[in-house]
């Protein structure tokens, strides 16, 4: 995501490296590369020029502090302008209403049905809502079955009227069903087409007029770049929707759609899809996205994901086990499971400052932990609890059972022992380390 843009912007800022102050000449050279980077990311020429004009105006009007280099100042200005270009601040979903009605619109293949299920799962697990999914796509083969399967996965009821070809009536009946059965959010999946046509627009407009939704969300495939922006504008002219959803942002996308949709249609991006799993959905934060584009990472999102998987009671138990040097392979396995729940491994690493560029060419498989898990699962309960019993014969048996080599088993056991020793040291020295730090601070005052 945005890897090409990030790399080109980084190169553009190097023009100012070592410069003592900002001048019209060195700014012009930097902004020429910035504009080219935006054009390569599929941002339109008009918006690219407006963006660089704003940056130039701000850069030449700034006084460079002695503690800040011209390059650092330019990064800050570009960061602020990118944030503003993408909407400035996050926009919340309006789920007021009894029930709140959310209408999903978009072209066929944009990921509408999958997003509808992801949104239902998000509202259920993160917001404590009781959502109802509505199968309103009566044309695409297997669309209803797809929504049913996804509904089963997330344990959310799907309302259908088998054989009906009238999506307006289906939507009306679904809302009645929701009111009678205690559902407080209704998410209506609608039909898409391979291209914008009058029939499609008339149908989605009729549904919106009938159900009067709190939110109409336009779902667009970010892989389509500037075409996505043009489609978003055509839909907005007809539907006047409340927000945009960008899907497949984890793919090989140049980022033009994310950067320019807000400035073209004047509607915020509310969610982004970042994978196939039902929890692979993120609220869109313009500032955090600007951080990632400029290689600053996204620590806030990383911490938030970790907190979602954090169990305070289990953490206290684990801390006691570490203090007593009783941390075992069962605990190790539990920590791996929590990390996997946080999302795509490469995406998580990319949230660390400076790591996006470092791993851009690395192929980090989501199944990176599979080999480790196979080795641990091949151990007996006694071996997991007490790794000191792992002699040569046991390690050979574990290697054969997990489809790995003895060397790989040995490597894992050594890494585990090193980790356990380090964790024990950190726990036992915590108080002593704090006391030493306080003494050092007193000496320096």
Image: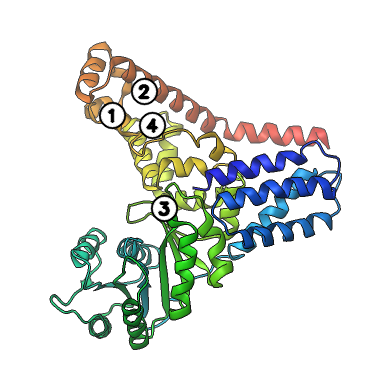
In the rendering, at what x and y percent does residue 68 appear? 80, 45
Q: In this view, does 412 lie above or below 237?
A: above
Identify the mark nearer the N-term, 3 or 4.
3
Mark 3 Cα-neighbour bin, 10 Å: few <14, some 14–19, many ≥20: many
Q: Disc 1 designates what residue?
A: 376
- Residue 110 percent across, percent down from the top left: 36, 61
Marking on residue 178? none
Tell me where residue 419 appears, x and y as whole percent.
45, 27
Question: What residue appears at the point 31 percent right and 81 percent down from the top-left corner?
Answer: 203
Residue at the extreme left? 163
Please, what secondary structure does the residue beneath circle 2 have?
helix
Q: Farthest residue toward the top?
A: 392
Q: How far apart are marks 4 and 1 (CA)?
A: 14 Å
Residue at figure coordinates x 56%, y 72% from the top left: 266
- Residue where numbered disc 3 is placed: 274
User: 10 Å neighbourhood of mark 1: few (<14), some, or many (≥20)?
Assistant: many
């Amino acid at each position: 995501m945005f890897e090409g843009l990030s790399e080109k912007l980084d190169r553009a800022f190097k023009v100012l490296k070592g410069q003592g102050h900002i001048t019209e000449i060195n700014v012009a050279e930097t902004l020429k590369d910035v504009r080219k980077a935006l054009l390569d990311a599929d941002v339109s020429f008009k918006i690219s020029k407006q963006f660089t004009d704003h940056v130039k105006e701000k850069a030449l009007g700034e006084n460079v502090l002695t503690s800040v280099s011209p390059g650092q100042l330019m990064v800050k200005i570009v960061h602020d302008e990118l944030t503003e270009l993408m909407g400035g601040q996050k926009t919340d979903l309006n789920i007021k209403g009894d029930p709140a009605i959310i209408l999903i619109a978009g072209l066929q293949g944009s990921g509408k049905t999958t997003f509808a299920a992801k949104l239902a799962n998000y509202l259920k697990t993160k917001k404590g809502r009781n959502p109802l999914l509505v199968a309103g796509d009566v044309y695409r083969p297997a669309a209803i079955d797809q929504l049913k399967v996804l509904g089963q996965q997330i344990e959310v009821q799907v309302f259908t009227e088998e054989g009906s070809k009238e999506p307006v009536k289906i939507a009306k009946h679904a809302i009645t069903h929701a009111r009678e059965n205690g559902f407080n959010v209704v998410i209506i999946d609608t039909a898409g087409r391979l291209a914008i046509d009058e029939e499609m627009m008339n149908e989605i407009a009729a549904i919106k007029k009938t159900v009067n939704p709190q939110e109409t969300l336009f779902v667009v495939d970010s892989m389509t770049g500037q075409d996505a922006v043009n489609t978003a504008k055509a839909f907005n002219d007809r539907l006047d929707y409340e927000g945009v959803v960008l899907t497949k942002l984890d793919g090989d996308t140049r980022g033009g759609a994310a950067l320019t949709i807000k400035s073209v249609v004047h509607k915020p991006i509310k969610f982004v899809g970042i994978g196939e799993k039902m929890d692979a959905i993120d609220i869109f934060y313009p500032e955090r996205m600007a951080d990632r584009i400029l290689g600053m990472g996204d620590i806030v999102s990383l911490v938030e994901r970790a907190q979602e998987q954090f169990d305070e009671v289990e953490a206290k138990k684990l801390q006691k086990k570490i203090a007593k040097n009783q941390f075992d392979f069962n605990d190790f396995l539990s920590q791996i499971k929590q990390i996997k729940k946080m999302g795509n491994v490469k995406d998580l690493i990319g949230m660390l400052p400076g790591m996006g560029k470092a791993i851009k060419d690395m192929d980090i498989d989501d199944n990176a932990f599979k080999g480790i898990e196979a080795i641990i699962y091949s151990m007996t309960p006694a071996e997991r609890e007490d790794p000191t019993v792992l002699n040569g014969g046991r390690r050979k048996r574990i290697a054969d059972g997990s489809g790995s080599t003895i060397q790989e088993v040995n490597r894992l056991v050594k890494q585990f022992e090193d980790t356990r020793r380090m964790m024990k040291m950190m726990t036992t020295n915590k108080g002593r380390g704090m006391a030493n730090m306080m003494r050092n601070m007193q000496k320096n005052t």
